[in-house]
Image (cartoon, coloured by chain):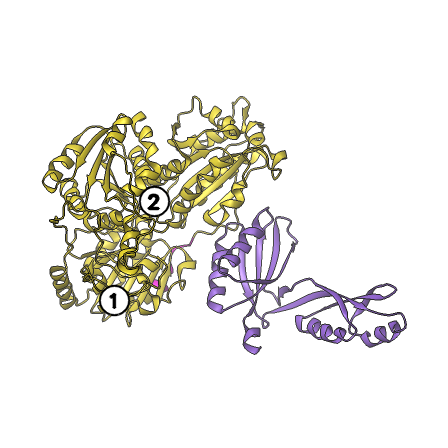
């Protein structure tokens, strides 16, 4: 993971405050944007931003700032930086920090804090954010000495984006940022002897993995987010083609191996394609490249790919043996490992296997047909695919629309698919798209959101308007918290509870109130033209697609079940399904 | 009882001497519902680092995860489990026992060579002992005869033997 090398500190500086030293350091690390919301304890830092080349993006809610930083980081590979005040300003970042932590996203969160003599005394807007966030950060600091600021910033940038990336929080008491910085350098030595980045992968481990491929007739490569972070796509392509092995991907691994490739099986897991999940039931070897065998994939570890050899590549040693015991593993950077592995394997005889899988593809395609009952989300998203052809950066929210988008919006590059996978954070999709648009101003960025999640962070429409960001927001409005409604229908005898979003606004009028163009779709015959109109419009557009209310996502593997128990087609009305044993 | 015993683990952490380290490590245990039986934190010869010795009860797979997850913490220099083969362990305990003045001499006599008297009061004695956990357990059983008012134990310390460092 690359960091910009800090520029040499010029010796002829006039005196500066801790806050000014902080901003100088951030400039030196190449920070372009800070997403934030001001407040009393952070005023010295906001003051130091006046005249800085770093652009301050004032958001409407701190959660939005964290997701923007997150989307920026996922799309560009550079850490996103957030600046908020103490107390509620700081606690409003917790969801965003947790989201970044679950998905290994580099992010630096700067929080103002009450003056240090008042720490722990229930001062106005004091919150122990250092303590509150401890379980959801890669590391955190409470800075007590002004002159420590440059070292802390340097360590934070190093930690956040090396090894397995993750968020770093820096809590900055107001007296510490206000005091004069008297240090001699803005580029001091780091002091983190306990931080170890995995060394070069062990050749012996790679050879052990290569050996297991020998004689495999039904291999599957499983691409996860670690492969995206390592930019392992080219190496994986070489490996898949040399082995002649099919490739499936997790929700966050989408695109690192192009989903349009004939060897791709698309996404696996709870709402993955039938053919990817059937491949799991038939494979004799599966190799995870940067996936952590999460429960949405394995369903039930004891019944996951029974009899198949399991190989695991991960940069985080703690992931080995966490969910299942692999037959061989290698710890390190996914790209380095796969590049080496390509040299050590031979082409496999997979002709029969690929034929079998092609059969499944033909037999169980994803269904995006429009329904007699009205417009379907699947149809809209399939048309979005036809209009964008994979050239868009797609950022999704969480729920049914996310799964449909994952099924129909085939990704051809890992950094073009942004979704909250581990945390499943509703309200993520729209601000993450905004952050991605800041980082990739020339790219087409589409936020695919549900009516529920969008209403959690929609106030950032103001941010979009002010900065003239051409983000397209596609709202799949089924007037329900649809994924939960689906579970209640299938497993709780349709006893709907807490899922009806009665009272949704007119989203076109809502967009217009924020000075943003709104487009409405409720008929299949209008979808293509209105999507094209919106996508080709030079500014931001909110596309309000009203779809049928009671639709369900299939295929589905009920939580806690294995791929062997996948429900491919909607079950008959009277079918009684047992309640899932898995968590979610 | 036997299987429970084998589920007791002693883990030693070398950590940065910074605020919050204890919370970070304790959180890794708590998150997985692993109870800490004893915990000792103290200085090392290098003032930059502290030593934490934790004993905990639970299955081996969870423990492996806990050690790996704690080792990932930036403030943890290293974490490792120690077995009886490669290390020695000691613990210290204080027992306050009932001791009417007419029995004092006989109690002190009975404890000779097993523990020492740290404090004498009119009706109580404080008895101290350093030893392995099992030694202290034995003493505890013995002192129960006289009536233990309270017991304070230091928690287990571990040190690798020979050239190896802990």
Disc 2 secondary structure class: loop
**Colour in which chain A is drawn:** yellow
Residue behind mark 2: A426
- Left or right of residue A424: residue A347: left
Q: Which residue is tagged 1? A: A565
Looking at the figure, which quarter contains the C terminus of chain B?
Answer: bottom right
Chain hosting mark 1: A
Tell me: A391 left or right of A47. left
Instruction: State the mark number for residue B139.
Output: none
Image position of A205 with respect to A382: above or below: below
Q: Residue at x 50, y 39 (%)?
A: A170
> At 38% across and 63% down in the image, what residue appears?
A323
Mark 2 burial class by Cα count in 10 Å: few <14, some 14-19, many 20+: many
The quarter of the picture where the N terminus of chain B appears is: bottom right
Q: State the residue at coordinates (42%, 54%).
A: A198
Given residues A275 and A181, the one toward you in this image is A275
* Quadrant in the picture for residue B54: bottom right
Does the rendering let one see residue A435?
A: yes
Give the residue displayed 27% in from the left and 54% down from the top.
A486
Can you tell which quarter of the image residue A397 is in? top left
- What stretch of residues is rendered in magenta? A198-206
A4 relative position to A307: left or right: right
Coordinates of residue A50 in the picture (x, y in percent):
44, 22
- The chain assigned the colour purple in the figure is B
Give residue A364's position: percent from left, percent from top: 14, 60
Say if the magenta span includes residue A52: no
């Amino acid at each position: 993971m690359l960091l910009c090398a800090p520029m040499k500190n010029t010796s002829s500086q006039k005196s500066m405050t801790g806050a000014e030293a902080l901003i100088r350091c951030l400039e030196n690390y190449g920070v372009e944007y800070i997403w934030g919301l001001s407040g009393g304890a952070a005023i010295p830092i906001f003051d130091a931003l006046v005249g800085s080349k770093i652009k301050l993006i004032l958001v409407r809610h701190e959660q939005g700032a964290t997701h923007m930083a997150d989307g920026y980081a996922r799309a560009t590979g550079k850490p996103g930086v957030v600046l908020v005040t103490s107390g509620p300003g700081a606690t409003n970042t917790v969801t965003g920090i947790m989201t970044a932590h679950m998905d290994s996203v580099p992010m630096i969160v700067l929080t103002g804090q009450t003056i240090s003599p008042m720490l722990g005394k229930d001062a106005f807007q004091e919150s122990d954010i250092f303590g509150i966030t401890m379980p959801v950060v890669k590391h955190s600091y409470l800075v007590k000495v002004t002159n420590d600021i440059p070292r802390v910033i340097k360590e934070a940038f190093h930690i956040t984006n090396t090894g397995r990336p993750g968020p770093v929080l820096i809590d900055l008491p107001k007296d510490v940022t206000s005091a004069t910085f008297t240090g001699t350098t803005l580029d001091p030595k780091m002091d983190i002897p306990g931080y170890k980045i995995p060394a070069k992968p062990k050749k012996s481990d790679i050879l052990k993995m290569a050996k297991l491929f020998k004689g495999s007739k039904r291999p599957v490569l499983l691409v996860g987010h670690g492969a995206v972070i390592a930019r392992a796509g080219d190496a994986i392509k070489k490996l898949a083609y040399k082995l002649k092995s099919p490739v499936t991907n997790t929700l966050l691994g989408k695109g690192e191996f192009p989903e349009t490739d004939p060897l791709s099986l698309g996404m696996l897991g709870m709402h993955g394609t039938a053919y990817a999940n059937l491949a799991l039931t038939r494979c004799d070897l599966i190799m995870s490249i940067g996936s952590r065998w999460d429960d949405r994939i394995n369903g039930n570890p004891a019944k996951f790919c029974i009899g198949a050899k399991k190989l695991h590549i991960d940069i985080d040693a703690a992931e080995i043996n966490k969910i299942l015991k692999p037959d061989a593993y290698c710890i390190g950077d996914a790209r380095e490992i796969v590049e080496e592995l390509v040299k050590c394997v031979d082409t496999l005889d997979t002709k029969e296997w690929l034929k079998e899988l092609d059969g499944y593809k033909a037999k169980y395609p994803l269904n995006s047909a429009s329904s007699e009952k009205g417009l379907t989300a699947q149809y809209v998203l399939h048309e979005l695919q036809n209009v964008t052809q994979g050239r868009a950066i797609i950022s999704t929210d969480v729920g049914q629309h996310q799964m449909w988008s994952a099924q129909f919006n085939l990704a051809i590059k890992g950094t073009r698919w942004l979704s909250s996978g581990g945390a499943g954070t509703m309200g993520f999709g729209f601000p993450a798209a905004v952050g991605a648009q800041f980082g990739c101003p020339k790219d087409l960025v589409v936020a695919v959101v549900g009516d529920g999640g969008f209403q959690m962070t929609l106030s950032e429409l103001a941010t979009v308007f002010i900065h003239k960001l051409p983000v397209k927001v596609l709202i799949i409005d089924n007037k329900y918290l649809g994924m939960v409604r689906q579970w209640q229908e299938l497993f709780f005898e349709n006893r709907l509870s807490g899922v009806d979003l009665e009272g949704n606004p007119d989203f076109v009028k809502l967009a217009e109130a924020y000075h943003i163009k709104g487009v409405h779709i409720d008929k299949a015959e209008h979808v293509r033209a209105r999507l094209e109109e919106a996508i080709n419009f030079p500014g931001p557009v909110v596309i309000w697609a009203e779809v049928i209310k009671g639709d369900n996502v299939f295929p589905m593997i009920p939580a806690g079940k294995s791929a062997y128990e996948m429900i491919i087609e909607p079950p008959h009305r009277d079918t009684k399904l047992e309640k899932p044993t898995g968590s979610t | 009882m036997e299987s429970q015993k084998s589920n007791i683990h002693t883990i030693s952490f070398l950590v940065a001497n910074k605020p919050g380290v204890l919370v970070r490590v304790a959180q890794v245990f708590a998150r997985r519902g692993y109870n800490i039986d004893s915990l000792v934190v103290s200085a090392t010869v290098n003032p930059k680092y502290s030593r934490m010795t934790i004993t905990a009860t639970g299955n081996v797979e969870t423990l492996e995860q806990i050690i790996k997850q704690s080792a990932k913490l930036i403030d943890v220099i290293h974490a490792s489990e120690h077995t009886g083969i490669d290390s020695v362990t000691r613990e210290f305990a204080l027992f306050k026992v009932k001791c009417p003045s007419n029995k004092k001499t006989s109690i002190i006599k009975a404890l000779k060579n097993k523990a020492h008297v740290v404090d004498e009061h009119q009706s109580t004695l404080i008895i101290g002992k350093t030893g392995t956990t099992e030694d202290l357990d034995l003493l505890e059983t013995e002192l129960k005869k006289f009536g233990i008012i309270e017991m304070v134990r230091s928690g287990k310390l571990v040190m690798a033997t020979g050239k190896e460092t802990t």
